[in-house]
Amino acid sequence: MAGLMKLACLVLACMIVAGPITSKAALSCGTVNTNVAACIGYLTVGALPRACCTGVSKLNSIARTTPDRQQACRCLKTAASALGSGLNAGRAAGLPKACGVNVPFPISLLTRCINCNSVK
């Protein structure tokens, strides 16, 4: 439980630091991180709460433009890097399917070679 609290604090820190960073996108990292914060448990230990899927669905619905999707990608990469090796890459990649949400780009939060500028 202490580890989960540390992860939550780290996500909060990422939200504070990365929140103002946007590039022609109305979507902020604070919004992205708030929507996926409930997924931390699933991405680290495997419990998939309903709030996680609600957040993924909401994020998908608000990231409608290319700049917003690219910004969401950058925010997720930053958050994943900050959380480190505790995240399960397979669960991250399968999160949209687990939640029944069809996203227009592949999710692989732990892959450093993702080029968010190629997200359409």
Image (cartoon, grey):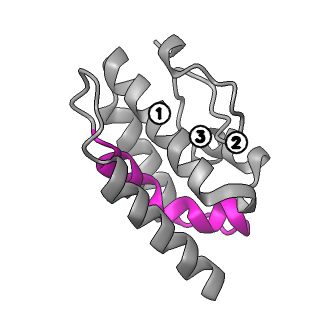
Residue 110 in the figure: left or right of residue 28: right
Identify the disc placed on residue 74.
1
**Residue 116, relative to residue 41: is it above or below?**
above
**Residue 120, relative to residue 77: is it above or below?**
above
3 vs 1, front mark: 1
Which quarter of the image is occupied by the N terminus?
bottom right
Identify the disc placed on residue 96.
3
| Residue 19 locus on image (x, y percent) | 29, 48
Query: Is 51 or 29 nearer to us in this picture?
Result: 29
Residue 102 in sight in this render:
yes
Going by the numbered disc 1, the residue's amino acid type is Arg
> Which residues fall within the magenta stretch?
28-50
Residue 1 in sight in this render:
no
Label 2 to label 1, Cα distance in Å?
Answer: 12 Å
Does residue 37 show up magenta in the picture? Answer: yes
| Residue 13 locus on image (x, y percent) | 40, 64
**Residue 68, relative to residue 35: is it above or below?**
above
Does residue 72 show up magenta in the picture? Answer: no
Identify the disc placed on residue 110.
2
Residue 47 in the figure: left or right of residue 105: right
| Residue 54 locus on image (x, y percent) | 42, 54
Q: Which residue is located at x 64 percent, y 24 percent?
A: 114
Query: Are circles 2 and 3 on residues that touch, CB within 8 Å?
Result: no
Going by the numbered disc 3, the residue's amino acid type is Pro
2 vs 3, front mark: 2
Task: Give the structural element (helix, strand or loop) at label 1.
Answer: helix
